[in-house]
C-alpha cells in the first residue's frame, strides 16, 4: 500500500489496533512488564487481604506469571505473544472457574494498583493503566 493511504477501520484486536496502543512502549517494554508482573504476584502472595485470590492460584506461580506477562505484552500494544502461543486469550472463559466477586476484583486491583504506582511515574499513563485494568477486572466478575 502506498504510504499515507488511509486504512480501513480494523476490528479490535487486529495488528493495526494493537500497534496504535502506545502503553507497551511508554511503560518500558518487556523488562518493565516482567517487573510489573513479578511485583504484582509478590504483593498478592504477601497481602492478607489478597489471601482468597492467592489461594485460587497454584502454589508455584511461574506459569501464572509467564501467562500474565505474555497476555499483557499484546494487551498493552506490544508483541501479541499470548495469541501467538495459545490463540485468542478468552479471558472471561478462562476465569469462569474462579469465583470472582467484587471483593476478589478489588483485591486483584489493589495488588495491581500498588505494583503500577511503584513503577509508573507518568501520572497520565498511570491513570489510563489503572482504568484499563479495572475495566478488564470488572469484566471478569462472574458473581
Ligand atoms: C478480577 C480478579 C482476577 C482473579 C481473581 C484472577 C484469577 C486468576 C487465576 C486463579 C488464574 C489461573 C492461574 C493459573 O492457573 O496459573 C488466572 C489466570 C489468568 N489471568 Fe486472571 N484473575 C483476575 C483478573 C485478571 C485480569 C484483570 C487479567 C488481565 C488484565 C487477568 C489475566 C489472566 C491471564 C492472562 C491468565 C492466564 C490464562 C490462561 O491462559 O490460562 N486476570 N487468573
Image: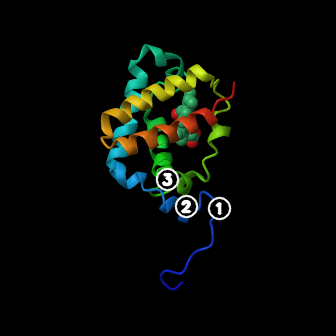
The percent coordinates of residue 28 (x first, y second) are: 32, 50
Q: Earlier in the sequence, mark 1 or mark 3?
A: 1
Where in the figure is residue 127, as x and y percent of width and height?
Answer: 43, 39
Tell me what residue is drawn at x 54 percent, y 81 percent: 5
Q: Nearer the viewer, residue 7 or 82?
A: 7
Q: In the drawing, does residue 106 fall left or right of residue 114?
A: right
Q: Residue at x 46, y 37 (%)?
A: 130
Badge 2 residue CB within 8 Å of ligand 1: no
Q: Secondary structure at mark 1?
A: loop
Q: What residue is disc 3 on?
A: 74
Classify mark 3: residues with Cα within 10 Å, few (<14), some (14-19) or many (20+). Answer: many
Residue of label 1 = 11
Q: Residue at x 59, y 62 (%)?
A: 14
Residue lying at the far front of the rendered structure: 124
Answer yes or no: do the residues labelled 2 and 1 have beta carbons within 8 Å?
A: yes
Mark pair 1, 3: CA separation: 15 Å
In this image, 105 relative to 22: left or right?
right
Name the N-terminal-most of marks 2 and 3. Answer: 2
Location of the C terminus (image quadrant): top right
Neighbours of disc 1 within 10 Å: few (<14), some (14-19), many (20+):
few
In the rendered image, the vertical position of residue 110 relative to residue 88, given as above or below: above
- Identify the residue under disc 2: 17
**Label disc, if present, on residue 71 of the rendered structure:** none
Q: Position of residue 67 (x, y in %)?
A: 49, 42
Q: Secondary structure at mark 2?
A: helix
Kindly report which numbered mark, 2 or 3, lies closer to the viewer in this rendering: 2
Q: Secondary structure at mark 3?
A: helix
Whole-number angstrom distance, CA of label 2 to CA of label 3: 11 Å
Amino acid at each position: 500500500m502506498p504510504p499515507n493511504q488511509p486504512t480501513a477501520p480494523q476490528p479490535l484486536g487486529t495488528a493495526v489496533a494493537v500497534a496504535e496502543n502506545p502503553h507497551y512502549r511508554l511503560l518500558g517494554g518487556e523488562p518493565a512488564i516482567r517487573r510489573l508482573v513479578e511485583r504484582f504476584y509478590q504483593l498478592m502472595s504477601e497481602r492478607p487481604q489478597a489471601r482468597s485470590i492467592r489461594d485460587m492460584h497454584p502454589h508455584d506461580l511461574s506459569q501464572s506469571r509467564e501467562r500474565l506477562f505474555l497476555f499483557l505484552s499484546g494487551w498493552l500494544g506490544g508483541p501479541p505473544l499470548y495469541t501467538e502461543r495459545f490463540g485468542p486469550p478468552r479471558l472471561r472463559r478462562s476465569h469462569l472457574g474462579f469465583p470472582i466477586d467484587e471483593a476478589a476484583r478489588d483485591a486483584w486491583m489493589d495488588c495491581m494498583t500498588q505494583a503500577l504506582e511503584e513503577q509508573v511515574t507518568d501520572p497520565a499513563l498511570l491513570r489510563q493503566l489503572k482504568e484499563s485494568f479495572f475495566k478488564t477486572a470488572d469484566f471478569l466478575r462472574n458473581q
